[in-house]
Amino acid sequence: MIDALTIAVAVTALALAAWCGWATYRDQPTKDWHFIGMAVVSLLGIAQLVIGCVQLARGQSPDEGTAIFVAYLLGAAACVPATGFMSLSERTRWGSATVAAGGVVLAVLEVRLFDIWGGGSA
């Protein structure tokens, strides 16, 4: 995996979580600017999915198994879009809270992807 991309996805996900958390604190639903932020984070997640699949196709393999790696890749790519759609149905502060939680979950998934690929081993 590309470590810089993993870090970029995690950092942007946490920034999105903080931004939507601030909207929750201010009792605001998700707005258009939040959806632009979600799109940026989602594109990074999709780029990571594509790069991960290409690396698998080239014969590289994660330390902890291909199946769990692909499952985490798919979950990471779907996390923010899923919470974004959920926030559309909940047009209160809780929609923003849902996206904030999704950003935190995505950051945790990124740490786990890093470990599964073998980035944590010396």
Image: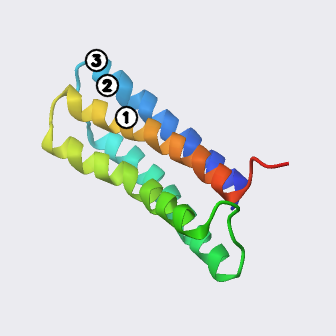
Q: Is residue 1 left or right of residue 16?
A: right
Whether 56 is drawn above or below 78: the answer is below
Residue at the spot of label 2: 23
Q: Position of residue 28 (x, y in %)?
A: 23, 25
**Residue type, numbered disc 2:** Ala
Count how many numbered circles sit on residues in the image: 3
Q: Residue furthest front?
A: 64
Residue 5 numbered tag? none
**Residue type, numbered disc 3:** Arg
Assign a secondary structure to mark 1.
helix
Q: Position of residue 57 (x, y in %)?
A: 63, 82
Whether 75 is drawn above or below 9: the answer is below
Can the viewer see residue 106 in this picture? yes
Whether 93 is drawn above or below 59: the answer is above
- Give the residue at x 38% y 49%: 80
Nearest to N terminus: mark 3 or mark 1: 3
**Residue type, numbered disc 1:** Ala
CB within 8 Å, label 3 to label 2: yes
- How far apart are the two marked residues, 3 and 2, measured between alpha carbons? 5 Å
Assign a secondary structure to mark 3.
loop
Colour logic: rainbow
- State which mark lies toward you, 3 or 1: 1
Residue 26 numbered tag? 3
Assign a secondary structure to mark 2.
helix
Quadrant containing the N terminus is bottom right
- Give the residue at x 46% y 52%: 40
- Give the residue at x 68% y 65%: 62
Residue at the spot of label 1: 101
| 28 vs 11, nearest the viewer | 11
| 26 vs 64, nearest the viewer | 64
